[in-house]
């Protein structure tokens, strides 16, 4: 008996040899969340891959430059390095500074507000899915994408910066363009901005409005809030010189924190107290006996970054937990 053309033979359906659908990595609610936000998720992953490839390629050129004869001679090295790599590093730091903004505005803001605006949340939660599970999966998927992208970009940028850390930004690793864009800090900042965007979406239904609020938070964070999380930093190290020896020399790789002058009783005075005096004897005549330099050593940088990141991450986790708790207890 012949089989009609176009009629699938039993056991050999169009979706597979045995008539079953091909296996998927994601199923159920995670698959639905991926389908909802796949454009943003895929865009973030592709941009991350492109950024990492570019920065790793730049790292290769920098290491070749530092191993070359000009670097060995060390004559005008900083000036030549800045001319050659100053702009690429500046562009890369701008890219890294945008990672938290993208996480908050384009991942966090539409995460909940988009479903509330379109009414998707009502459709999903009228099935066999609770609001708590829906929120947990939504937040979990966004957190995973955020961690993967921010960690990969941070690792690539850090590996590019470290070989030339004494030349980039004049060696000032405490500047925001370095400190906030290397190590664990970008991951923590991205998660905090994601959490803020998602939390605002619980209370504001319009996605564009939520995106605007998330963007405003980024500006407020950079201008006002960021400094609050430096409270856990260690005290700066101290070097003292008698006034006859002048200001202490800054150790290699260290960053200057402050300069003081010291009187015979150990009291601190501003750097300008003995600035215009011609001789050390003139300084001593004013009661100044020593010059004091406060600095942070390069070896302190990892501990300071992990402290800062831990405080920011704690705020992000608390906000995500509050969003989940609040969303489970109020109609969306």
Image (tube, helix red, strand yellow):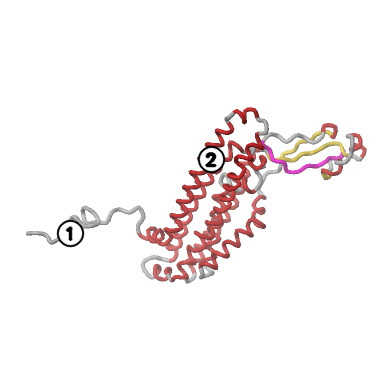
Seen at 52% across and 67% down, the residue is 208
Magenta span: 253-264
Residue 217 placement, left or right of 32: right
Seen at 50% across and 44% down, the residue is 54
The part of the image, by quadrant, that contains residue 277 is top right
Whether 307 is drawn above or below 1: the answer is: above
Residue that extends furthest to the right in the rendered view of this protein: 285
Q: CA distance from mark 1 to mark 2?
A: 54 Å
239 or 219: which is nearer to us? 219
Q: Please give the residue where the numbered disc 2 appears in the rendered image.
A: 58
Lower position in the chain sequence, tag 1 or tag 2: 1
The part of the image, by quadrant, that contains residue 238 is top right
- Local crowd size for mark 1, using a 10 Å CA cut-off: few (<14), some (14–19), many (≥20): few
Q: Single out the mark in the foreground, 1 or 2.
A: 2
Dominant SS in magenta: strand
Element marked by disc 2: helix
Query: Which image quarter holds the N terminus?
Result: bottom left
| 163 is within the stretch colored magenta | no
How far across and down, in percent of the image, does residue 214 sit? Answer: 57, 62
User: Any mark on residue 8, and which?
Assistant: 1
176 or 241: which is nearer to us? 176
Element marked by disc 1: loop
- Local crowd size for mark 2, using a 10 Å CA cut-off: few (<14), some (14–19), many (≥20): many
How far across and down, in percent of the image, does residue 330 sit? Answer: 49, 70
């Amino acid at each position: 008996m012949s089989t009609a053309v176009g009629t699938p033979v039993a056991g050999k359906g169009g979706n597979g040899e045995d008539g079953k659908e091909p296996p998927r990595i994601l199923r159920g609610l995670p698959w639905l969340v991926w389908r909802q936000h796949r454009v943003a998720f895929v865009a973030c992953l592709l941009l991350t891959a492109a950024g990492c490839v570019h920065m790793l390629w730049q790292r290769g050129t920098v290491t070749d430059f530092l191993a070359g004869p000009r670097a060995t001679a060390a004559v005008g090295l900083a000036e030549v390095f800045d001319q050659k790599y100053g702009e690429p590093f500046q562009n890369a730091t701008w890219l890294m500074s945008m990672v938290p903004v993208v996480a908050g505005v384009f991942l966090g803001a539409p995460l909940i507000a988009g479903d509330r605006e379109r009414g998707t949340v009502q459709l999903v939660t009228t099935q066999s899915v609770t609001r708590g599970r829906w929120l947990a999966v939504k937040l979990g998927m966004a957190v995973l994408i955020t961690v993967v992208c921010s960690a990969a970009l941070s690792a690539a940028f850090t590996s590019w910066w470290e070989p030339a850390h004494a030349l980039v930004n004049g060696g000032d690793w405490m500047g925001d363009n370095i400190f906030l864009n290397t190590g664990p800090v970008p991951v923590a900042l991205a998660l905090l901005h994601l959490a803020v965007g998602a939390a605002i979406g619980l209370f504001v239904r319009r996605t564009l409005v939520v995106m605007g609020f998330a963007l405003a938070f980024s500006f407020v964070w950079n201008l006002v809030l960021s400094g609050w999380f430096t409270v856990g930093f260690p005290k700066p190290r101290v070097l003292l010189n008698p006034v006859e020896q002048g200001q202490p020399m800054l150790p290699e790789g260290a960053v200057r924190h402050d300069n003081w002058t010291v009187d015979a009783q150990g009291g601190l005075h501003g750097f300008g107290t003995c600035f215009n005096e011609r001789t050390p004897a003139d300084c001593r005549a004013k009661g100044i006996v020593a010059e004091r330099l406060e600095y942070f050593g390069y070896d302190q940088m990892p501990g300071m970054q992990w402290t800062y990141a831990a405080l920011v991450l704690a705020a992000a986790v608390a906000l995500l937990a509050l969003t989940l708790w609040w969303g489970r207890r109020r109609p969306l």
